[in-house]
Image (tube, helix red, strand yellow):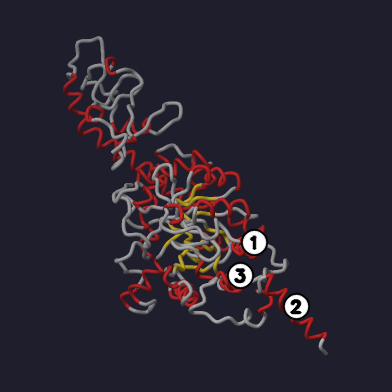
Amino acid sequence: MPGEASESELRGPVRVPNGRMRSLTTCTSSLTPSPTKGHRLLTPGNVSSVTNLQESSAAEVPELNVNDPDSCLGQTHSSGRQRVPRDSAMWTGWWLWPLVAVCTADQFRDNAVRLMQSTPVIDGHNDLPWQLLKKFNNQLQDPRANLTSLNSTHTNIPKLKAGFVGAQFWSAYTPCDTQNKDSVKRTLEQIDVIQRMCQLYPETFLCVTDSAGIQQAFQEGKVASLVGVEGGHSIDSSLGVLRALYHLGMRYLTLTHSCNTPWADNWLVDTGEDEAQSQGLSSFGQSVVKEMNRLGVIIDLAHVSVATMEAALQLSKAPVIFSHSSAYSLCHHRRNVPDHVLQLVKQTGSLVMVNFYNDYVSCKAEANLSQVADHLDYIKKVAGAGAVGFGGDYDGVSRLPSGLEDVSKYPDLVAELLRRQWTEEEVRGALAENLLRVFKAVEQASDHKQAPGEEPIPLGQLEASCRTKYGYSGTPSLHLQPGALLASLVALLLSLCLL
């Protein structure tokens, strides 16, 4: 593992700046990270976070006196009292390091729990509704689908409570193979199952549609449940469908999934697997973004191409989110956000909610909690602490980092951020306040008094095999090419002259 401490570093005894070995019980407080001391601590599963606790060199470490009650294992004295040889002190390090690790890990986790009790996590993306469709065909009253005991998923009610999840954007997802077929129907069904989760478990879930609703759920100790529609194909290239989904509770729309829409390009364009159709956003795609701004729907750029990211960030009047993406510089996967886009995120006050999927964290099949924290660190460094959030992608991925196996593990990730000397303000931002800020800005930018967009997408940009042409066929002159329109006018004038 990169940055892993050497065996010799782990063997040595705990040293503190005054050159004494101190007991675990009397010294724990001195191990608290401090910007002035520069101490970092050993953590379970994260040896890379260990640095030397000494400020003096190893040569200055004295032999230890076991009879001195003021020290852990003794202290150097000029008297002739018995001393512990250096080898014994080194041997002591073998058992002392694990004890220090356990003690300090508990301290950071306790602080994480304390913070999360007042500022629970808002997660940007969870695919539990998709699992409910696959496993139970959305039949929530099936005894096997009981969310208090369902164990075959990353998410259930006990795990949500253990993870201090206070708000969740549930994904209303339908695959790309539904495009130009039954994508709208499938999306409506997924929104319906989210709403029925709230109805069936009212003591746990509170379906909300605005930032104030999230804060109300926090106060009531419930999980604020919001709808995020994952994939622009779900609106079937219709501003009317976009508005209808808004009225049904959709509060973010991911502009594409892993396929182009007729008006926006997806991330596979950047790998060469798909061809660019819109060079980011088409003219109709720009209309979609403007209508989302007008309505107050958050624009989600997870899954889109870099050109689409750039176009949407430049066009949108409100901040945008990446509901479940990570940092490209740490893992060169095209689903992640490159540095120049992170700069646009910073300039626009937007938000990247870090994905936990191993392939986007480490670019390998294996990953760990520390590497997820690396992505959070990196985005904070490049785009600022206000640009960081959590978008675990639970129940939508097949591989998760060790230490983040399900939604109950959020406190462990928060503890790791505290261990890395994130301030409480920065942690609260990543947990909830950054998303709330973005959501409020989107709400403030909305304007329902403004006339809605009405211009339809050109018929020629739609795949017509499974659709009717009502509206288009009734006004064919609106869609004629200039030459054909001129020919029609000449024919009309000739007919008038013959009258």
Q: Position of residue 43 (x, y in %)?
A: 31, 39
Q: Position of residue 315 (x, y in %)?
A: 63, 54
Q: CA distance from mark 3 to mark 1?
A: 14 Å
Mark 3 is surrounded, within 10 Å at the Cα level, by few (under 14), some (14 to 19) or many (20 or more) other residues, namely some
The type of residue carrying mark 1 is: Lys
The type of residue carrying mark 3 is: Ile
Q: Is residue 56 left or right of residue 346?
A: left
- Residue receiving disc 1: 290
- Residue receiving disc 3: 457
The type of residue carrying mark 2 is: Leu
The residue sitting at 78% across, 86% down in the picture is 495
Q: Nearer the viewer, mark 2 or mark 3?
A: 2
The residue sitting at 51% across, 63% down in the picture is 220
- Residue receiving disc 2: 489
| Nearest the eye: 54 or 182 | 182
The residue sitting at 17% across, 16% down in the picture is 82
Among numbered discs 3 and 1, the one appearing first in the sequence: 1
Among numbered discs 1 and 2, the one appearing first in the sequence: 1
Outermost bottom residue: 499
* Quarter of the image with the C terminus in it: bottom right
| Nearest the eye: 442 or 113 | 442
